[in-house]
Image: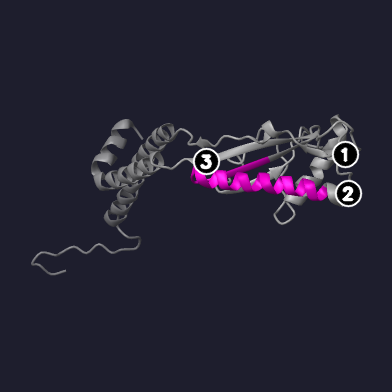
Amino acid sequence: MSVWDVARAVRRQVVVLLVALLATGWAALALTQEQPVYWARVRAVLVAQGGSPNWLAQPGESAIPLAGLLERRMNAEVDAVPTNSPDVTIIDRGITHGTVVFLPDRGGQWAHNFTEPIVVLEAAGPDEASVHEQMDSLISRLRGELTTLQRDLLTSRSPRVGFSDPTLDYQVQAAAGRPEVGAVGVALVGTVLAVLACVCVERIRGSARNRDVEPRPGAIMMTAAPGGRV
């Protein structure tokens, strides 16, 4: 099919073209008006409090099991969070309203590798206020779980393990993406599909016209004899 054939099909199927372009324009406009999703992250680092370390407060890897216990307690009533790279955010997981708690996993495809005494808290929501509310609730609960866990393990009152306060600070961010670029992509794809729809409809109508013109198999041609009689 040549370019002229495509142009002829588009000219004959103007209604199909207009309907498809209107649908494309509506989709592109809806994409540009998409509201951003807000989210925040905390990387809570476990540290020893006081001067006399206990078996939970040794520097380095010995605090990692405690972080694992905290993560288990925080996720006791929810489904386990799939293991991903520490760089994967709650938005990357497709969660637009909710929270996740997990440990940074530096492992590859075949094995886990937890190398840091860190518990990651993330929250997402439709506005900043909801994210603040969820994050504050997570941090408060995490502190309470740590206190309860050390009490259950009969750890001496002082010193204990706590969180580095600066690591509990967070900032709410907006994940809006690039809606303008997405709208341009939708417009281009929609225009191409509109032209293809015109070509398809024109071919279908052309095939129907050809079937109507062609004689049916086995049909008997009747001719009139002189005098008007068959």
Task: Decide which of 189, 171 is in the foreground and name it.
Answer: 171
- Residue at x 85%, y 41% (from the top left corner): 65
Q: Is the residue under label 1 in contact with that under label 2 (CB below 8 Å)?
A: yes
Spatial CA span between label 3 and label 1: 35 Å
Q: For mark 3, what is the residue?
A: 38
Spatial CA span between label 3 and label 2: 37 Å
Q: Amino acid at mark 2?
A: Leu
Residue 104 lies in what quarter of the image?
top right
Q: Amino acid at mark 3?
A: Tyr
Give the residues drawn in magenta, as a range: 121-149
Q: For mark 2, what is the residue?
A: 153
Mark 3 closeness class: few <14, some 14–19, many ≥20 residues within 10 Å: many
Residue 127 inside the magenta-drawn segment: yes
Task: Decide which of 204, 128 is in the foreground and name it.
Answer: 128
Element on which disc 1 rests: loop
Spatial CA span between label 2 and label 1: 10 Å
Residue 227 lies in what quarter of the image?
bottom left
Q: Is the residue under label 2 in contact with that under label 3 (CB below 8 Å)?
A: no
Element on which disc 2 rests: loop
Element on which disc 3 rests: strand
Q: For mark 1, what is the residue?
A: 56
Position of the C terminus, as image quadrant, is bottom left
- Residue at x 35%, y 38% (from the top left corner): 191
Position of the N terminus, as image quadrant, is top left
Magenta stretch: dominant secondary structure: helix
Q: How is the image coloured?
A: one colour
